[in-house]
Amino acid sequence: MTMSIIILASVLLWGAVINELSKPSKKQNNRKIVSLVSLSSLLTIIITISLFQNLPF
């Protein structure tokens, strides 16, 4: 259940990044973009590590 929430949050954050980057460059908030990309990347790393831990070797 926790993983589903993390995945959903990651997808929503990446969507927010795409939305912010699709704005004209004069209306883009660079601070917001950096924050969203940082948090999204962190969640993506958490998801990736979790998925690799669940792989049988």
Image (spheres, rainbow, N blue to C red):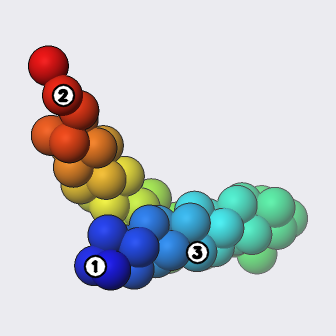
Query: Going by the image, does 10 lie left or right of 28?
Result: left
Question: Nearer the viewer's eye, disc 3 or disc 1?
Answer: 1
Quadrant in the picture for the C terminus: top left
| The quadrant where residue 19 appears | bottom right
Task: Give the labeled residue for mark 1.
Answer: 2
Whether 45 is drawn above or below 24: the answer is above
Quadrant in the picture for the N terminus: bottom left
Q: Mark 3, residues whose alpha carbon is within 10 Å: few (<14), some, or many (≥20)?
A: few
The reply to whether the C-beta atoms of the residues labelled 3 and 2 are less than 8 Å apart is no
Instruction: Tell me if I can see residue 1 in this picture.
Output: yes
Q: CA distance from mark 2 to mark 1?
A: 21 Å
Query: Going by the image, does 35 lie left or right of 33?
Result: left
Q: CA distance from mark 3 to mark 1?
A: 15 Å
Give x and y (percent) for residue 11: 56, 66
Question: Mark 2: which secondary structure?
Answer: loop
Residue visible at 32% across and 69% down in the picture: 3
Looking at the image, is mark 3 or mark 1 earlier in the sequence?
Answer: 1
Disc number for residue 21: none
Give, as a three-letter code, the residue at label 3: Leu
Give x and y (percent) for residue 25: 77, 61
Question: Nearer the viewer's eye, disc 3 or disc 2?
Answer: 2
Give, as a three-letter code, the residue at label 1: Thr
Instruction: Tell me if I can see residue 45 in this picture.
Output: no
Residue visible at 50% across and 74% down in the picture: 8
Looking at the image, is mark 2 or mark 1 earlier in the sequence?
Answer: 1
The reply to whether the C-beta atoms of the residues labelled 3 and 1 are less than 8 Å apart is no
Query: Going by the image, does 13 lie left or right of 51?
Result: right
Query: Foreground: 16 or 47?
Result: 47
Disc number for residue 12: 3
Q: CA distance from mark 3 to mark 2?
A: 29 Å
Task: Give the labeled residue for mark 2.
Answer: 56
